[in-house]
Amino acid sequence: MKQKRLWALCLMSVVWLCSCVTTTQGPFEQKKDLEKAEKIYIQLGYGYFENGQLLKAKEKLSEALAINSKSAGAHMGLARVYEQEQEYSLAESHFQKAIQYGGATEAHFQYAVYLYNRARFEDSLAQYNEVLKDTLYERRAQVFYYQAIALTRLQSFDEAITAYQKSLVLNTELAGSYLGLARLYNNDQSTDQAYQSYLGFIELVRARKANQNAASLWLGIPLAYVHGDMDLYASLALQLKSQYPQTDEYSQYLSWQAEL
């Protein structure tokens, strides 16, 4: 009920602001009122988007564009909506306009994620590189992490390792980076480095800052065994057996164990 009242107040604010610009005012006051209305429409659009109300989101974001056709925030919002609706050509058009009209770092980041999800890994990397030019960007660690994933898909493994390492320099609690390094090192037969990277992940699990799944458990079992860490080995094997008995990872574990 409180949320509905809040939406009602927001909508009333939009109506009031839009009515204000029809009164006799100077150019400066009119511009300020329009800017406020634009921001409120964008906020409403994003709110509808987060609630899955895509049509209403498009309506509000389009109203923001009616006020300012170069609104980077409105174009970004529409890009996200059209991506959700699988209208990819429209989504891409609005992503590019968001960048063109000053969306800057965040627009490049969102566009990079979109391109990766479309399996356009090289294009995605180009956008991540644009993001990383901004050394003050608050999600810089995550950008290196996503960059590493894209590099891995392109089989640029050494570069991926470097990107994972940079992500952990900036944020030591990125569980995915520890697992990514462990997998890459393990695939390269660098089991010592793989084991150490996996232990970084285990520390986060023990601190309840990360969770195991079948894939991460199966990754750690042979690493723990090879390094004589039998307590960890037994713990991981028990979790895999009890929590994921129907998975491919557990079947692979049984086959591996039978060959020991």
Image: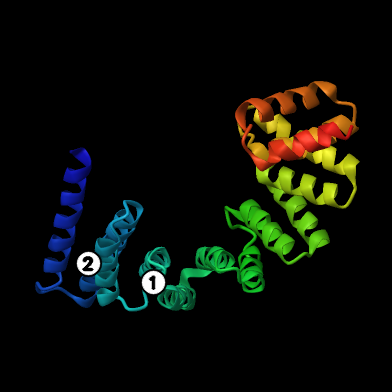
The crowding category of the residue bearing disc 1, from other C-alpha atoms within 10 Å (few below 14, some 14 to 19, many at least 20), is many
Labels 2 and 1: the sequence-earlier one: 2
> Is the residue 100 above or below the residue 178 in the image?
below
State the CA–CA distance, disc 2 to disc 1. 20 Å
The residue closer to the viewer here, 131 or 208, is 208
The secondary element bearing badge 1 is classed as helix
Left or right? Give the position of 151 relative to 8: right
Quick one: which residue is furthest to the left in this view?
23
Give the amino acid type for the residue marked by disc 2 in the picture.
Asp
Q: Position of residue 248 (x, y in %)?
A: 67, 42
Left or right? Give the position of 239 relative to 189: left
Which residue is found at the position 18% from the left and 61% from the top?
Answer: 14
Quick one: which residue is furthest to the top in this view?
231
Mark drawn on residue 33: 2
Which residue is found at the position 28% from the left and 70% from the top?
Answer: 64
Which is closer to the viewer, label 2 or label 1? 1
Looking at the rendering, which quadrant does residue 258 occupy?
Answer: top right
Give the amino acid type for the residue marked by disc 1 in the picture.
His
Q: Quadrant of the C terminus?
A: top right
Q: Quadrant of the N terminus?
A: top left
